[in-house]
Image: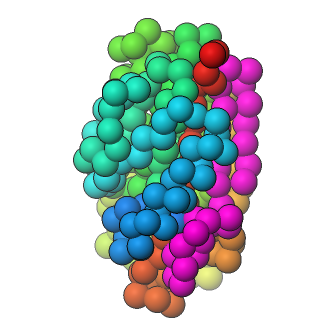
Amino acid sequence: MDFFDFDNIVCYFFDRDSGFSDGLFSSLNCSRFVGDNPESVEKNLEFVRKSVGAKKLITLNQIHSAKCVIVDENSESDQEADALVTQSEGVALGILTADCVPVLLADPVKKIVGAAHAGWKGAKSGVIENTIEKMVSLGSSCENMISVIGPCVHVESYEVGKDFLDNFPPKYFSKICDKYHFDVVKFCCDRLREKGISKISVNEIDTFKNHEKYFSFRYAKKNSDGICGRNISVICIKPTT
């Protein structure tokens, strides 16, 4: 588990260890939507909540969209969306990934946070921009924002077919061993910069290469019909009481 502490805001990136799930979901699977034992998932989510020191942990039923919702202490989990923001202390925002990019956003000045699930579809559709705009609607400013990108699939492991190339400009593709590879991290960073966010930290862990430590859908697709758990990335405004 990696974490960042911005005085009044904390970001956590959990790996797949220290949980209660078994088999292909072993052990800290935090998704209710991948076929894992529901009781194990709830134990995993409670472990995460306590580890972060949050009063409440909110996650989503992620649908690879650009939809972002504002939540507070009265909100429930499992809304259909791919990003969420809050200005409520002690409410942890959880994003679930298994190769997709978890993008966490913090405004330590205004104490507003956001979290986005940026798969290629959501990133292309504007999920990062929508998250930033929702934070701004609560009073944040891009000049104050800090962004942290968590463990995800990096360009060396993101092989794509020729039919994928029309989805993004050529600068986001590389040829490695005569195969096309997509740099989703670079695309996400550019989306942040174009919105005026310059403070960007990128975790260099490649989930595909580190599949024993992190859930990787691409690895699972080759080895277990795509069945695997989901890693969780969390951001939370520290409670003052």
Q: Position of residue 59 (x, y in %)?
A: 41, 46
Q: Quadrant of residue 157?
A: bottom right
The residue at the point 54 percent across, 59 percent down is 44
**Magenta highlight range:** 1-28
**67, above or below 7, in the image:** below
**231, above or below 53, in the image:** below
Does the rendering let one see residue 13? Answer: yes
The image quadrant where one finds the N terminus is bottom right
Instruction: Answer left or right for 230 relative to 9.
Output: left
Q: Quadrant of residue 50?
A: top right
Q: Position of residue 100 (x, y in %)?
A: 48, 58
The residue at the point 40 percent across, 26 percent down is 73
Is residue 198 magenta-colored? no
Q: Position of residue 110 (x, y in %)?
A: 55, 10
Residue extending farthest to the bottom is 223
Q: Nearer the viewer, residue 167 or 137?
A: 137
Instruction: Answer left or right for 11 relative to 162.
Output: right
The residue at the point 58 percent across, 34 percent down is 54
Is residue 4 magenta-colored? yes
The image quadrant where one finds the C terminus is top right
